[in-house]
Image (cartoon, helix red, strand yellow):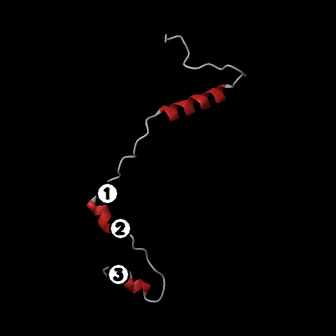
Amino acid sequence: MSAEEPLFRVVRGNPTAEELAALVGAVLLRSRPTGTPPQVTRSAWTSSARPGGVSPVAGPGAWRASGLPR
């Protein structure tokens, strides 16, 4: 393929510049390699401040229980 030969061409119709830009964007998005997203690492500092799976429960004595160790 030469440098002057287009990668694709419009066979029928008269697309606008916006429609061609949308087509190019879709082709580029689909041609990217798919992979797993990078793992987000949390520092020990932030993980110790947010205990996992524990949500506050409203009710009598909830304010006192919120300060107790779990």
Q: Earlier in the sequence, mark 3 or mark 1?
A: 1
Q: Nearer the viewer, residue 44 or 1?
A: 1
The circle drawn on residue 42 is 1
In this view, which residue lies farthest toward the left?
Answer: 44
Picture quadrant where residue 55 is located: bottom left
Q: Nearer the viewer, residue 37 or 70?
A: 37
Give SS at disc 2. loop
In this view, which residue lies farthest toward the right?
Answer: 13
Q: Which residue is mark 2?
A: 50
Q: Amino acid at mark 3?
A: Gly
Q: Residue at x 26, y 61 (%)?
A: 44
Q: Earlier in the sequence, mark 1 or mark 2?
A: 1
Q: Which residue is mark 3?
A: 67
* Residue 57 picture location, percent across and down: 46, 80
Q: Amino acid at mark 2?
A: Arg
Q: Amino acid at mark 1?
A: Arg
The image shows residue 58, relative to residue 16, as above or below, that is: below
Give SS at disc 3. loop
In screen coordinates, is 7 left or right of 39? right
Q: Residue at x 48, y 82 (%)?
A: 58
Q: Earlier in the sequence, mark 2 or mark 3?
A: 2
Q: Nearer the viewer, residue 14 or 61?
A: 14
Mark 3, other Cα within 10 Å: few <14 / some 14–19 / many ≥20: few
Quadrant, the C terminus: bottom left
* Residue 67 picture location, percent across and down: 35, 81
Give SS at disc 1. loop
Q: Residue at x 53, y 10 (%)?
A: 4
